[in-house]
Structures are given as structure tokens and as C-alpha cells.
């Protein structure tokens, strides 16, 4: 990872809420917009980061991420770079279904996926290993576009951000479920030797409990 670990500060931001999030539907690479609460969360995230000097904002190409990124970038007058490698996992046949419905229809597969998402493929979807490869590619793109002293914000999704957090901190990617990043939450990482460490996380009043 040596040549990729070049940035001063990295801020990971999860997009604001959508109706599908509220309804506990598998969202993946489907593309619903932010709901009213999600728009507020995007504004709160931008306000929380007002003290940071953000040079570049990188975003998934999903509309919920782009809308959140636009609010943050607007406050900092920073350019937004879109990278589809930051997309959420493709949940295939599960997309649009509620967690309860998936649990009822695919109980064995759901349990297997929760135990080992790296080797378990949802029909028509991706494994976590494939998502992890995408995320590492995205980080290489980010490192190439930014300079050594830049502070960058990366606006993406719960799954892709958890894997990126593992990659940057040197934590085994199989432990990605250990991290919970709420809607509109910002996790600030600073360089600590050969890897990054979490400096703090911030979320607004409407963030997930």
C-alpha cells in the first residue's frame, strides 16, 4: 500500500437517508434519491465539516451519494470527482426487498452471507471480495488525483466505506462488519505511520442512533 498512502487527511462520509433505507430495503446499486431527512443529514454533515479545509470531494456515482457530496463540496468550493468504483455492493435479486422479506425467502443464504459475505454471492449480485477489489481501485484513483497535503472527502455507502476504512487502517477486511457508519456520518482519518487511524467521527442531530 506504500505508494497509495499519500494523503494527509481523509474524511469518509456516508450518504444521507433514502426512503429505502428507512424501510430497511436492500438498496445496493439501485438509485433512489435522498428523502427529506437525508437532505437534512447532508446539510448537517457539511456543517460539521465546515472547520475542515477540504480540497477534493470524491463520490460514488449513485444519486444519493452525489447529492450528499454536492452539499459538502458547495460549502468548501471544492471540485467533485465521480468514481463508480465507490458504489455500494450489488445485491442482485435482493435489491428492493426488505430485510424481513429476504430473511423469509432466503433464510439459509442470508445466514451464509452474514457469516461470510466475501465468499457468498447473492444471485445476480457481487461478493464482498469483488466490492473490496473495486474499493481498493477507487483508493488508487483518489491517491493519483490528490496531492500529499490534500484533505479529501469520500462520499459513498455503508458497505464500500466500511471496506475502505479497513483498507486504510490496515484492519483485516473480514472485520468490516465491526464498523457502523450512519447516514450523514463523517469519519475523519489521519496518517499514523504507515496507515491511517480514526481521529473522530461526527454526525448531526438527525443521524442514525
Image: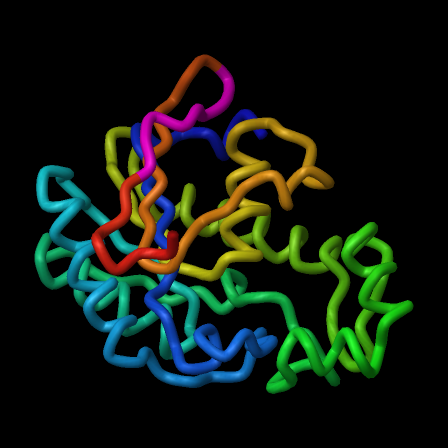
* Nearer-the-camera pick, 103 or 115: 103
> In front: 104, or 153?
104
In the picture as drawn, the residue positioned furthest to the top comes out as 193
Judge whether residue 1 is colored magenta. Answer: no
How far across and down, in percent of the image, does residue 189 sit?
37, 31
Which segment is the magenta one?
A: 194-201
Provide residue 196's location: percent of width, then percent of height: 45, 25
Report the residue at 21% width, 54% height from top.
Answer: 205
* Residue 71 as seen in the image, left or right of residue 101: left
Residue at the right extreme, as displayed: 108
From the viewer's perspective, is residue 132 above or below residue 32?
above
Total number of numbered discs in the rendering: 0
Reply above or below: 154 against 120.
Answer: above
Q: In this view, does 87 lie above or below 207?
A: below
Left or right of residue 206: residue 13: right
Viewer-nearest residue: 64 or 84: 64
User: Residue at 74% of width from left, 85% of height from top?
Assistant: 93
> Percent from the top left, x then y, of residue 76?
10, 53
62 or 201, nearer to the observer: 201
Asked which quadrant contains residue 117, the reply is bottom right
The answer to whether residue 22 is above or below residue 169 is: below
Q: Which quadrant is the N terminus positioned in? A: top right
Residue 51, image quadrant = top left
> From the viewer's perspective, is 33 left or right of 120?
left
The residue that appears at 17% across and 45% down in the rendered structure is 49
> Magenta span: helix, strand or loop, mainly?
strand
Residue 45 in percent (x, y) is at 22, 54
* Residue drawn at (49%, 69%) of the image: 84
Q: In this view, does 157 lie to the left or right of 174?
A: left
Amino acid at each position: 500500500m506504500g505508494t497509495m498512502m499519500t494523503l494527509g487527511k481523509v474524511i469518509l462520509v456516508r450518504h444521507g437517508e433514502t426512503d429505502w433505507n428507512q424501510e430497511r430495503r436492500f438498496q445496493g446499486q439501485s438509485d433512489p434519491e435522498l428523502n427529506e431527512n437525508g437532505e437534512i443529514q447532508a446539510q448537517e454533515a457539511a456543517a460539521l465539516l465546515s472547520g475542515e479545509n477540504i480540497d477534493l470531494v470524491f463520490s460514488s456515482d449513485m444519486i444519493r451519494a452525489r447529492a450528499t457530496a454536492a452539499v459538502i463540496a458547495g460549502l468548501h468550493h471544492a471540485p467533485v470527482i465521480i468514481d463508480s468504483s465507490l458504489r455500494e455492493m450489488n445485491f442482485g435479486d435482493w435489491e428492493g426487498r426488505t430485510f424481513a422479506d429476504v430473511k423469509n425467502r432466503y433464510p439459509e443464504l442470508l445466514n451464509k452471507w452474514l457469516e461470510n459475505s466475501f465468499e457468498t454471492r447473492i444471485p445476480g449480485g457481487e461478493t464482498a471480495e469483488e466490492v473490496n477489489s473495486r474499493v481498493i481501485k477507487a483508493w488508487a484513483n483518489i491517491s493519483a488525483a490528490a496531492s500529499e497535503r490534500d484533505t479529501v472527502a469520500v462520499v459513498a455507502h455503508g458497505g464500500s466505506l466500511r471496506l475502505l476504512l479497513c483498507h486504510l487502517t490496515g484492519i483485516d477486511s473480514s472485520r468490516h462488519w465491526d464498523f457502523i457508519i450512519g447516514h450523514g456520518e463523517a469519519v475523519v482519518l489521519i496518517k499514523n505511520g504507515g496507515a491511517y487511524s480514526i481521529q473522530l467521527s461526527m454526525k448531526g442531530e438527525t443521524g442514525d442512533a
